[in-house]
Amino acid sequence: MCGFVGCVSPRGFAKEQGARIVEGMLQTIVHRGPDDHGVWVDGCAGVALGHRRLSILDLSEAGHQPMISATGNLVIAFNGEIYNHLALRTELERAGLEPPGGWRGHSDTETLLAGCDTWGVEATLKKSVGMFAFALWDRTKRTLTLARDRMGEKPLYYGRQNGVFLFGSELNALRKHPDFEGSIDRNALTLYFRHLYIPGPSTIYSNIQKLTPGSILVVPTGSPDKPAQEIVYWSLVQATAGRRFAGSPDEAVRELHRQLEEAVDMQMVADVPIGAFLSGGIDSSTIVALMQAQSSRRVRTFTIGFEEAEANEAHYAARVARHLGTEHTELTVTAADALNLVPRLPHIWDEPFADNSQIPTFLLAQLTRRQVTVSLSGDGGDELFHGYDHYRLASSLERVPLKRTCAWVLRTMPFTRFARLWALMPHRAARRITPRRLATLSAILGEPAPHLRYRQLLSFWGQPEQLVVNGAEQSSFLTPFEAIDFKDFSRSAAMVDAMTYLRDDILVKLDRAAMSVSLETRIPLLDHRLVEFAFSLPTSYKLREGLTKWPLRKILHRYVPAALVDRPKKGFGLPIGAWLRGPLKEWANDLLSEQAIRRRGLLNSEPISRALRNHEKGPSDWGAWLWPVLMLQAWEAALT
């Protein structure tokens, strides 16, 4: 696991100048690779690559980057892991295609470089299993190639500024280039307020993008006006189109078990200490169970707990750890621990990011890094096996007849009258109806198509264009929604989440939190072969016997008694609303004041002030709406 940066200038530059620029960019990502660093420059071609290394495989100098191919044709800066690189080496050797002079070491970077030199980039990536992002300079063709893994586990940003093409693992690094302009993309901000993250390919900056997962970008360097060519070598929609598992539910469990064992086995290979996050839930417990079953040593597991009893689930993880016999470490987090981290958040996440579970995720990564360099995670299980409660809610709303008529009734009927009618219904929800929830329901049912209704269900600020000054929502974000037919609503919703929320929230949260403390994370459930298999399963195999994630549970119950792990799903969130009324009140009020909002000129202050007033007078909790405003304001303040 590493980080890299680079630039291509049509003007060229002196070698010393290019090295100095890239060294400055690298200083911002030391945390991604504290073990080693390198710079490669071709001043005549105007190309400079920089790399920071976190040594995981082949700790010797043979793994140093940027790395030049044995033929001398290619130079690579690589971040990530190719889990099947030994199999790729064997394939090259059997065909007599190993590098001239033989292998210099046993790093996966060298294997990837040899594959690209022999088979070409696209063919090599189609053979590869892993998580990665890289920049590859072809010295013969004088082209730059950027590539990213299929599910988007590793980040890669790029864009042209003042004619110079910039790229790197973090936006913070791009900001250090002297040609970086950094104008805010107000349209991207509207998406941020709807979703609490900025969906790809957008970033907070105009003319800077995230490379789409599963894509290759070939950048010609002769002319700044010549467009780059994007090649999609894998897409979730295309890879799963028409695929349906034909076996029985029990056969599906056996095949999933086999694939998971293989994925975990591949991802446990490292030349440094390795462990796992363990929450005690279905996903992480399954990964740890398979790790321990395949390990001759006690697996190191890590969890954090909270002082507040209602938020603390650490005892569940401890029970699973005792049953499996892992070497378990637990840390109880106080409110003070979490609050002390808040000022650091804008520095860790390089663009506005408002999933407040970023705080416990960072604290867990920090705890884990004290003992290991690599940690496996159970992320992805909710999207692959329908673990989110909102899938059921969304499916129920799709069955409501005359949706737009119902939406009109909800908008026009006085809330007091509706509440009296609702109270007559024999349903627990009668105690939870509020004007805000009624307005949300009306907005969902008022949308004309299933994918728009689902997007509205996932929204926070439902009309973000009213919040952002001169902001408008980009229709490009709807592309993943529109590419799916929504006939099987739960499957379609899960696929949308895998292409949006998982990529740009969950994986961003995990990567930035872990890499900020130089911890590599690996996610066995996101092995692309397993992802394809999961989406080939009928929904009835995932939601079965009244349970979510039925296949995963069946596997886990072979290792852990059901009583230890079967319980309602609980999030990893924090009591942000209470903090904004208590210990964070002064900090929040400063950032949310009308003067502070107007001074920065990005947001309309009126809806923010109204939300703050409603939150302070209670009893409604507006913390989820105020937190993204605070994260934006804090992020902007950190830049000045």
Image (cartoon, rainbow, N blue to C red):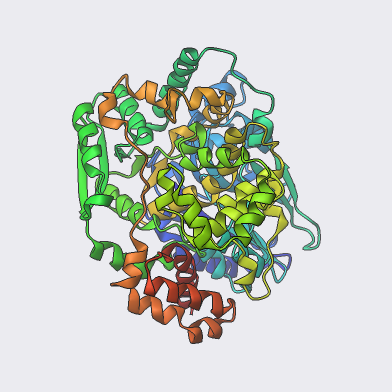
Residue 331 screen position, x and y as percent: 21, 50
Q: Quadrant of residue 71?
A: top right
Q: Nearer the viewer, residue 311 or 244?
A: 311
The residue nearer to you, when weighing 68 against 287, is 287
In the image, residue 239 above or below residue 201? above
- Is residue 580 shown to the viewer in this render? yes
Foreground residue among 13 and 558: 558
From the viewer's perspective, tell me whether residue 114 is left or right of residue 620: right
Task: State whether residue 414 is above or below residue 151.
Answer: below
Residue plotted at (75% across, 53% down): 228
Residue 574 lies, with reference to residue 489, above or below; the image says below
Relative to 515, 194 lies left or right: right
Residue 379's spot in the image, x, y percent?
Answer: 43, 40
Give the side of residue 369 with respect to residue 593, left or right. Answer: left
**Residue 48 appears in view:** no
Residue at 69% across, 32% down? 238
Q: Nearer the viewer, residue 407 or 44?
A: 407
Residue 256 picture location, percent across and down? 47, 21
Q: Residue at x 51, y 33 (%)?
A: 384
Numbered circles on residues, count: 0
507 lies left or right of 580: right
x, y percentage for residue 41?
59, 59
As drawn, 261 above or below 585: above
Quarter-of-image position of residue 523: top left
